[in-house]
Image (spheres, grey):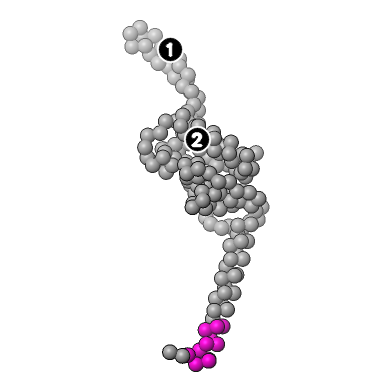
Amino acid sequence: MILPPAFCAIGASMNSRLLEIREAIDAHLRAILNLRAEESVIISARFRLPGPMLEFDADGRTIRWIGGEVVLGKKPYKFVKSLYDADNHRLRIEKITRTVWGGRYTAHATIKMTVSNLCRQLSAAKFPYEIESVKNKMRVENVKNPVSGEIKKIIIQPEIKGFRLGVKK
């Protein structure tokens, strides 16, 4: 079927208009990625970290920001992505083991070692944020010896209860 010339002209003008709209959308998306914390533009109702926005590429496990990028392993990538996506950029240790390690039991030492290696790698890449551990407070408790009845004070050391993504100091 051959269309009359008038229809072809309309189709061509519609394609050029769609191309203009697509270019405008791309320009807006680039502008959003270049936003700085001092600008008072609200992207969403969620809490946003001051500083550059991060862009995640799941296929290559790459995290990009203005001025840099870093390629991570599977678990470190999931760890940073889940922290960045979480409300207030905080995650409890139980949620981390579910999202990163698939819900299997994971020793705290394994998590601490993974985070330690990850922080070293991010620091070398000049990552704009830092990962902070959220710990329980150290506390002193009185424990009664069941045999002698003697009360003894013990110090309970703080343990990691989660992690938080924060602005570098």
Pair 2/1: label in front: 2
Counting from the top left corner in percent of width and height, residue 36 is at 65, 53
Disc number placed over residue 114 in the picture, else none = 2
- Could you tell which of marks 2 and 1 lies nearer the N-terminus? 2
The residue depicted at 64 percent of the width and 43 percent of the height is 126
Q: CA distance from mark 2 to mark 1?
A: 37 Å
The residue depicted at 33 percent of the width and 11 percent of the height is 146
Q: Which residues are magenta?
A: 3-13
Counting from the top left corner in percent of width and height, residue 99 is at 42, 43
**Relative vertical location of residue 25 with respect to residue 17 in this rendering, above or below:** above
Quadrant position of the C terminus in the picture: top right
Counting from the top left corner in percent of width and height, residue 105 is at 37, 34
**Relative vertical location of residue 16 with respect to residue 27 in this rendering, above or below:** below
Q: Amino acid at mark 1?
A: Lys
Q: Describe residue 22's horizontal placement relative to residue 149 as left or right.
A: right
Badge 1 density bin: few <14, some 14–19, many ≥20, Cα 10 Å: few
Q: Which residue is mark 1?
A: 152
Q: Secondary structure at mark 2?
A: helix
Residue furthest front as drawn: 1
Instruction: Provide the major secondary structure of the magenta segment.
Output: helix
Q: Amino acid at mark 2?
A: Thr
Closer-to-camera residue (46/116)? 116
Q: Secondary structure at mark 1?
A: strand
